[in-house]
Image (cartoon, helix red, strand yellow):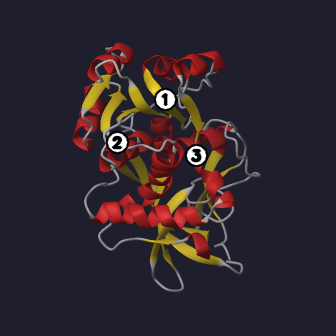
Amino acid sequence: MRAWRVHSLGNPAEVMSLDEVDEPTPDDGQLLVQVRAAGLNFPDVLMTLGQYQEKPPLPFTPGVELCGTVVETGQRVLGSPSGGPGAFAEYALVDADAAWPVPDSMSDEQAASLYLTYQTGHVGLHRRAALQAGEWLLVHAGAGGVGSAAIQLGKAAGAKVIATAGGERKTAVCRDLGADHVIDYTAQDFVPLVKEITGGHGADVVYDPVGGEVFDKSRRCVAFEGRIVVVGFTSGTIPQAPANHALVKNYSIVGLHWGLYRKHEPALIGQVHAELCRLFEAGAISPLVGSTMPLPQLPAAMAAIADRSTVGKVVLTP
């Protein structure tokens, strides 16, 4: 079978190759899955660069979420490959107890876009931030895979959503997703606008996958008893949070590493999956697939993710 493999850490275009390798053999508790679609995420780029918190041994096949057909039964499932990355291949192994059924009405591409970002968004907004109906939710990078999921999940929860994005194309995407207010951060400072939109109240919940200056500015427009959810650092800069500022404004900085729940509370994953499927079938959420590319174009897809030129999720199809 064909599989992309990272042979050394560095620029994805230079360190990956599309190799012919043996089809994997499942152990007890594993399923062999023929990959139908694989979602691309920013951590895939960071892992290839060696800048992610998880560092699989070389050589490894990147890709952390997929939709595929179980070879033995023909059932469509979604999830992550067993033991880490491995989705950017024609076949992959998935743990049987972490292979989640795909609704019949959901396309392969949507299914490959649901697992990571929507699980993260649901756990982040509900479990970590306790988002309530009627609250103000500020979503940064709203047109991306992570942000687009948060906008939809926020609206489904009854929140009033403010989204930030860069440029006319991406702000239009946020409006189409249902954001109540959209701010083009390349043309306007979002801090005074968030204060104005909320009547001086500020954002009750900030969903921040960007970090850096965006995090620092968010601290200036978060509400009393607000919650800033730290999702990631696509800016490349990890901010330093002054504890005295959190004290004088009575807000919380909430970390979100969704993958830890697979270790500490695995039952939550199934509960959230069931809720996400319910929301999808009710029309409340619909994964935004920005582009679909064939498997051999993975380096180009990673470059597009890295330079933030994409909207929604990029999906690879073998």
Disc 3: CA contacts within 10 A as few (<14), some (14-19) or many (>=20):
many
| Residue kind at label 2, given as amino acid type | Ile
- Which mark is first along the chain, 1 or 2? 2
Task: Name the secondary structure under disc 2.
Answer: helix
The residue nearer to you, when weighing 35 against 203, is 203
Query: CB under 8 Å between callouts 3 and 1?
Result: no
Mark 2 surroundings: few (<14), some (14-19) or many (≥20) residues within 10 A: many
What is the three-letter code of the residue carrying label 1?
Glu
Q: Is residue 297 above or below residue 174?
A: below
Decide which of 74, 99 is in the foreground and name it.
99
- Disc 2 from disc 1: Cα separation: 21 Å
Q: Quadrant of residue 63?
A: bottom right
Q: Nearer the viewer, mark 3 or mark 2?
A: 2
Of circles 3 and 1, the one toward us is 1
Q: Residue at x 31, y 22 (%)?
A: 184
Amino acid at dot 3:
Asp
Contact (Cβ within 8 Å) of mark 2 with mark 1 = no
- Disc 3 from disc 1: Cα separation: 34 Å
Q: Quadrant of residue 267?
A: bottom right
Which dot marks residue 267?
none
According to the picture, the residue beneath numbered tag 3 turns out to be 44
Residue ID at (77%, 52%): 57
Against 31, is 154 above or below?
A: above
- Residue at disc 1, secondary structure: strand
Q: Which residue is mark 1?
A: 225
Q: Which residue is mark 2?
A: 151
Check disc 3 and report its element: helix, strand or loop. Answer: helix
* Image quadrant containing the N terminus: bottom right
Residue name at image x 69 percent, y 54 percent: 60
Between circles 2 and 1, the one closer to the viewer is 1
Q: Is residue 62 above or below residue 141?
A: below
Residue 310, picture quadrant: top left
